[in-house]
């Protein structure tokens, strides 16, 4: 899996968009970008994934640069419940794939 | 429907004892994964199964750790002769396609 780099921590005001960056400059052509988050002591939760096109679901949007060397996860209207550690993972898609978690970004949503 | 469940949720044991951690995946999920998570860090891959076959055990730290999934459903992670350094949160996940669903984890404390 390609190495990913994320900021250690970020703050965001409640109700504003949270933009979480991720660098994956060595990503290969068949690797997807996955995002998971972990709220406090709960298990990680899948958010979204994409290959090269931008993706959107009910939780977030994923913007991947044209050269695929970086991406941004966008939470359009952050709430206090979005406070969590967010992990960006580059890996080949499919069910039989172990995930390599880095240190992630601690997002704190402020009231 | 029911998510991934793990038992026990908490386990305190003395150094040198064997422990068995159980994972009940989501019904029908083909793949099952074990991870270990130290405080303040992301989950670290241990091993995974497709159906009953152990596909990759490269993340198991040493031969005191073993896992099985004999009928392709419930899995057990066994740690023999536990050591204090084995203390951690042990998480199980299952998947059918791209998304891994994580259980609540078992907090293991070795005294």
Image (cartoon, rainbow, N blue to C red):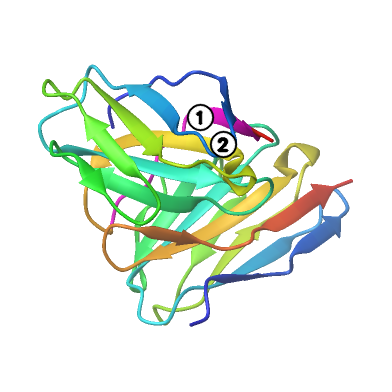
Q: Which residue is mark 1?
A: A104
- Tell me the chief SS of the magenta region: loop
At a point 58% along the width and 22% down the height, the residue shown is A9
Q: Position of residue B66 (x, y in %)?
A: 54, 57
The chain ID associated with circle 2 is: A
The range drawn in magenta is A96-109
Q: Taking B70 as reference, is A44 left or right? A: right
**Helix, strand or loop under label 2:** strand
Quadrant of the image containing the C terminus of chain A: top right
Residue under numbered circle 2: A85
Residue A71 place in picture, x, y as percent? 28, 27
Q: Position of residue A10 (x, y in %)?
A: 56, 22
Chain containing mark 1: A
Residue B52 position (above or below residue B27): above
Q: To which quarter of the image does residue A54 belong?
A: top left
Q: Give the residue drawn at x 38%, y 41%.
A: A35
Q: Residue at x 28, y 38 (%)?
A: A62
Q: Magenta stretch containing residue B52, yes or no?
A: no
Q: Are marks 2 and 1 in contact (CB under 8 Å)?
A: yes
Distance from disc 2 to disc 1, alpha carbons, whole Å, reads 6 Å
């Amino acid at each position: 899996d390609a190495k990913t780099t994320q900021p250690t921590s970020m703050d965001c005001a409640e109700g504003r968009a949270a933009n979480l960056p991720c660098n994956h400059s060595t990503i290969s052509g068949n690797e997807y970008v996955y995002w998971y988050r972990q709220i406090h002591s709960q298990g990680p939760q899948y958010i979204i994934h994409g290959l090269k096109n931008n993706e959107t679901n009910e939780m977030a949007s994923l913007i991947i640069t044209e050269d695929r060397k970086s991406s941004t996860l966008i939470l359009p209207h952050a709430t206090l419940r979005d406070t969590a550690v967010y992990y960006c993972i580059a890996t080949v898609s499919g069910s039989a794939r172990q995930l390599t978690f880095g240190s992630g970004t601690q997002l704190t949503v402020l009231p | 429907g029911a998510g991934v469940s793990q038992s026990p949720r908490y386990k305190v044991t003395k150094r040198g004892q064997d422990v068995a951690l159980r994972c009940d995946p989501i019904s029908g999920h083909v793949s099952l994964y074990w991870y270990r998570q130290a405080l303040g860090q992301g989950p670290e891959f241990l091993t995974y199964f497709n159906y009953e076959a152990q596909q990759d055990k490269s993340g198991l730290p040493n031969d005191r750790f073993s896992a099985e999934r004999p009928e392709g459903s419930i899995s057990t992670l066994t740690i023999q002769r536990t050591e204090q350094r084995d203390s951690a949160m042990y998480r199980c996940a299952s998947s059918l396609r791209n998304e891994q669903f994580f259980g609540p984890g078992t907090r293991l404390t070795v005294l």
